[in-house]
């Protein structure tokens, strides 16, 4: 049988069915019926070859994007993290970052002292006036004590006037303490300076005035020292008698 008329058709059919053209022509010879139904052995090699070809895979369906519809968000304001490991704190859930923050805040709240610190009170003008009055009353109560102290001092002075020897001994003892050495008639001129003697007698001039009522004022003593008319011996002898250089002029 000549295939010249069907060459173009059989060629296209061979490519479409992926069957070699000679085999297709042979099948055509045995009729199309035997090709498709009766004599399937003609296509055996071709079918095996076709089955060996790698099957094309269907495009994989894109994985569904994981959603957090079932996970609660962090209760920290402004945080968008969904919480997987839920550890509620007072009915709220937090992400790992804000969980520590919430725990520390809760601990501070639990350990805070229950007592409230006292707030300073603001006094009114009336209260301030009352406080001033209380202070004045307290000062008035203390004034008699001050007067009593002065009275006691006057009594001590009168006792000193009545005991001039005790006053002299006290002045001598004070001079020894001032120079950290026992001062006598033999060494008074060799111990200390005139300025030191002046410092000691300035401090105790009131006692000297009690011991010697006719002694000059201390300001006149300083003038006499500057004029070199009063010397160290005159000051030392004040402990025993009143030198003429230190007497008031009549």
Image: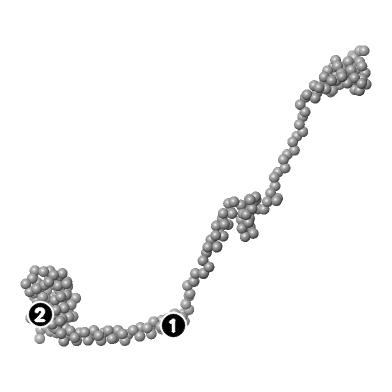
* Place of residue 23 in the rendered image (x, y in percent of width and height, measured from the top left): 86, 16
Does 60 sit above or below residue 242? above
Q: Residues within 10 Å of mark 1 (few under 14, many from 20)?
A: few
Pick the quarter of the image with the N terminus. top right
Left or right of 35 on screen, residue 63: left
Residue located at (46% from left, 80% from top): 127
SS for callout 1: helix
Query: In the picture, residue 154 is in which quadrant?
Result: bottom left
Residue located at (15% from left, 75% from top): 173
- The answer to whether any part of residue 4 appears in the image is yes
Does 23 sit above or below residue 139? above
Q: Which residue is disc 2 drawn over?
A: 240
Pick the quarter of the image with the C terminus. bottom left
Left or right of 79 on screen, residue 123: left
- Numbered badge on residue 196: none
- The answer to whether any part of residue 217 appears in the image is no
Residue located at (11% from left, 76% from top): 235
* Place of residue 174 in the rendered image (x, y in percent of width and height, measured from the top left): 16, 75
Left or right of 86 on screen, residue 172: left
Mark 2 vs mark 1, foreground winner is 2
SS for callout 2: loop
Residue located at (19% from left, 86% from top): 158
Left or right of 118 on screen, residue 201: left
* Place of residue 105 in the rendered image (x, y in percent of width and height, measured from the top left): 55, 59
Does 212 sit above or below residue 231? below
Q: Which residue is disc 1 drawn over?
A: 130
Q: Residues within 10 Å of mark 2 (few under 14, many from 20)?
A: few
* Place of residue 239 in the rendered image (x, y in percent of width and height, measured from the top left): 11, 78
- Label 2, label 1: how many angstroms apart (C-alpha)? 58 Å
Q: Nearer the viewer, residue 12 or 174?
A: 174
């Amino acid at each position: 049988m000549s295939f010249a008329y069907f060459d173009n058709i059989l060629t296209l059919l061979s490519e479409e069915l992926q069957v070699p053209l000679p085999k297709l022509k042979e099948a055509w010879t045995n009729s199309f019926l035997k090709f498709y139904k009766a004599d399937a052995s003609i296509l055996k090699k071709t079918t095996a070859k076709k089955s060996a070809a790698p099957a094309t895979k269907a495009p994989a369906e894109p994985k569904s994007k994981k959603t957090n519809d079932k996970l609660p968000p962090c209760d920290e304001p402004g945080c968008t993290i969904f919480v997987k490991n839920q550890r509620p704190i007072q009915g709220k859930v937090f992400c790992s970052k804000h969980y520590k923050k919430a725990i520390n805040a809760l601990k501070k709240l639990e350990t805070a002292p229950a007592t409230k610190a006292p707030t300073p009170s603001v006094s009114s003008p009336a209260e301030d006036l009352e406080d001033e009055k209380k202070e004045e009353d307290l000062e008035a109560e203390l004034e008699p004590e001050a007067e009593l102290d002065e009275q006691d001092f006057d009594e001590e002075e009168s006792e000193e006037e009545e005991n001039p020897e005790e006053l002299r001994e006290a002045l001598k003892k004070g001079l020894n303490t001032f120079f950290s050495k026992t001062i006598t008639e033999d060494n008074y001129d060799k111990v200390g300076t005139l300025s030191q003697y002046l410092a000691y007698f300035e401090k105790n001039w009131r006692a000297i005035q009690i011991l010697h009522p006719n002694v000059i004022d201390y300001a006149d003593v300083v003038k006499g020292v500057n004029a070199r008319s009063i010397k160290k011996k005159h000051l030392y002898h004040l402990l025993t008698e009143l030198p003429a250089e230190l007497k008031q002029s009549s």
